[in-house]
Image (cartoon, rainbow, N blue to C red):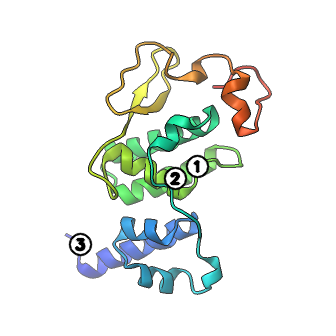
């Protein structure tokens, strides 16, 4: 059993690592339980360095996102799910998943730490909500795991567009066109 001091040290280490990944104060608070003023004081002595802007807070974003954003979101959540299944604490699983995602996907990274937090919250019903909006589904064609609406069942590759040749409609909203004609 961890002592109170050990739990606080663990929370501070997680907070520091999340801040290094670009997390907003609100996100750090949800993950660690640190009050916002304390997180600001400890992690952002230079107030100009505080991540600003509106935090992602809707699962609807994913359904309107282009193929590259959905693929990278699926990568983060597949890693997060594996870490959670290995009994990793939710906050540490999110941090590990995000770090791995940044390490394996080429920049520019389309998923911010706060977006990954929002996706994890809506996938597992954590932190922000009790309701699950997403689940990981396995494509029967390519066996890739991808995010889908909670309760979805993949019966064909109709749901996961990376099993099909890339189309201009799937990719042009991102401003990126892959060199090969097939995205995998």
Dot label at residue 115: 2
Looking at the image, can residue 16 be seen?
A: yes
- Secondary structure at badge 1 equals loop
**Comparing labels 2 and 3, the label whose residue is closer to the camera:** 2
The residue at 45%/15% (across/down) is: 140
Disc 1 target residue: 111
The quadrant the N terminus occupies is bottom left
Q: Earlier in the sequence, mark 2 or mark 3?
A: 3
Identify the secondary structure beneath mark 2: helix
From the viewer's perspective, is 105 left or right of 168? left
Position in image of residue 54 (x %, y %)? 54, 63
Quarter assignment of residue 152:
top left
Residue 117: image location, x then y, percent: 45, 55
The residue labelled by disc 3 is 2
Label pair 1/2, CB-CB below 8 angstroms: yes
Report whether 41 appears left or right of 90.
right
């Amino acid at each position: 059993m961890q002592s109170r001091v050990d739990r606080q040290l663990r929370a501070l280490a997680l907070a520091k690592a999340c801040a290094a990944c670009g997390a907003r104060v609100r996100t750090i608070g949800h993950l660690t339980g640190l009050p916002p003023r304390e997180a600001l004081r400890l992690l952002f002595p230079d107030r100009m360095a505080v991540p600003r802007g509106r935090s992602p807070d809707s699962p609807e974003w994913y359904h309107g996102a282009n193929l590259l954003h959905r693929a990278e979101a699926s990568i983060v959540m597949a890693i997060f799910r594996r870490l959670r299944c290995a009994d990793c604490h939710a906050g540490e699983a999110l941090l590990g998943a995000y770090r791995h995602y940044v390490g394996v996907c080429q920049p520019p990274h389309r998923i911010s730490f706060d977006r990954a937090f929002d996706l994890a919250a809506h996938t597992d019903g954590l932190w922000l909500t009790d309701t699950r909006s997403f689940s990981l589904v396995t494509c029967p064609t390519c066996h890739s795991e991808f995010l889908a609406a909670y309760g979805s069942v993949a019966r064909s590759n109709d749901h996961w567009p990376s099993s099909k040749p890339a189309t201009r409609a799937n990719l042009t909203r991102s401003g990126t066109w892959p060199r090969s004609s097939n995205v995998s």
